[in-house]
Image: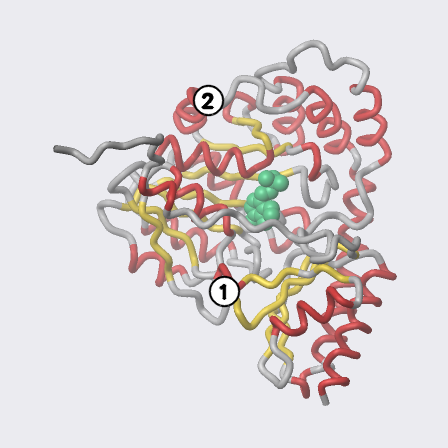
Amino acid sequence: MAQEKTAPQPKDWIMGIAPYVPGKSSGDGGQKLIKLSANENPLGCSPAAGAALNAASGSVDRYPDPGSTKLREAIAAKFNLDPERIICGTGSDDVLHLAANAFSGPGDEIIYVRYGFAVYDIAARRYGGTPVISEDNDYGTDVDAILAKVNDKTRVIFIANPNNPTGTLTPREEIARLHDALPGYILLVLDGAYAEYLEADEDDGALEFAKSANNVLVTRTFSKIHGLAAERIGWGYGHADIIGAMNRIRLPFNVTTAGQEAALAALAADDFVASSREHNQKWRQWLSDEMTALGNHGLRVIPSHTNFLLVLFDGKVTAEHANAALMDKGYAVRWLPGQGLVNGLRITIGTEDETRGVAKALREILEEAG
Ligand code: PMP
């Protein structure tokens, strides 16, 4: 006889999920830290988006527009897309989960790169799929390694471009080569959470691919350069059949009214986006130079195309120790052992003061250790 069960039993694959570990904003003793651990915009959001949020706070008794219609139309107009082929989500995390849900399940394989974004693993496992990790190429995405993992069970491939937590960029030609080599039944998800931080000539062509291919989904977010992380607004663009499938399982009111209004305003705030990008480039370069100058302590910086730097520790001071010591000095950065990055710290570019401060703190930690 089957063993008697006295409590609800989660699916085995659910219990196989390691819960997402968010970036810290306070220390173990509850003290507030300068948060450079979640790749948020240190300059906040645009004044127009802030004003839209305030204005929307007066109308909370009605459900939001379930289809985020105005927002999809504005995104379409801005990027020259078909609004019918856009889906909005509770952050782009939602869109990534919907993609895994609609296109994979038990017995299917979902590929992502070693040192890929943590949510891919959760999204893959959540629906019973099997995550398959392809080897990186010195922390970058290796298209041949991905292709070597493709088989008839593969259903979805997740690539963040640029990638989190490595900051690396896969050039357009490599994305094209990957797409050309893939069987049509595989959904290629190109996650552009950091796309706005790229220079115009670094564009990976993701939206262009998705316009003509029937197996590409592009995801974007308002959480990063637009500074609206708390509102949870993201979007995806793909073939009408891809979006149609995802819309069947999307929660009906998945973007709040305030979120839709704020995102609309953010989309029009080109000056704010440009100045955020400029600030990021300046201080990313500065921090990269500072960290590179600490090379004698075993530090190495992975060249970044995002609003954070991955710094590797191969000297006397480990990443784990530096992470704890930075917290003691008031800074939260991201140590990611759960993603296999035992020897690295990911540091978000902050304001000028925050960026100078974290560099100084890290220098002191290294010099104290000798
Ligand atoms: N993709 C990548 C690569 C990310 O780094 C993040 C945020 N950490 C997301 C997606 C999700 O962002 P959000 O849900 O806030 O849109």
Indicate left or right for 174 with 235 as reference.
left
- Find residue 357 and report its horizontal and vertical position in percent: 83, 67
Which numbered dot is residue 140? 1
Q: Which element type, helix, strand or loop, lies under badge 2?
A: helix
Whether residue 364 sits left or right of residue 157 in the image: it is right
Give the residue number, with chain letter if any, for mark 2.
247
Name the quarter where the C terminus is drawn: bottom right
Disc 1 is placed on an element classified as: loop
Check residue 11 in the rendering and tell me which mark sits there, or answer none. none
Could you tell me the amino acid type at mark 2? Asn
- The residue under label 1 is which amino acid type? Gly
Q: Position of residue 85 (x, y in %)?
A: 50, 25
Q: Residue at x 28, y 52 (%)?
A: 150
Residues 42 and 283: in front is 42
Q: Residues within 10 Å of mark 2 (few under 14, many from 20)?
A: some
What crowding class fits label 1: few (fewer than 14 Cα within 10 Å), some (14-19), or many (20 or more)? many
Q: Residue at x 35, y 31 (%)?
A: 7
Q: Earlier in the sequence, mark 2 or mark 1?
A: 1
Residue in the foreground of this view, choosing between 55 and 328:
328
- Is 209 or 145 nearer to us in this picture? 145
Q: Ligand 1 shows up in which quadrant of the image?
A: top right
Front position in the image: 25 or 144: 25
Outermost residue on the top side: it is 62
Q: Is residue 191 left or right of residue 77?
A: left
- 210 vs 326: above or below: above
Quarter assignment of residue 298: bottom right
Above or below: residue 67 compared with residue 221: above
Rendered location of residue 34, percent (x, y):
79, 56
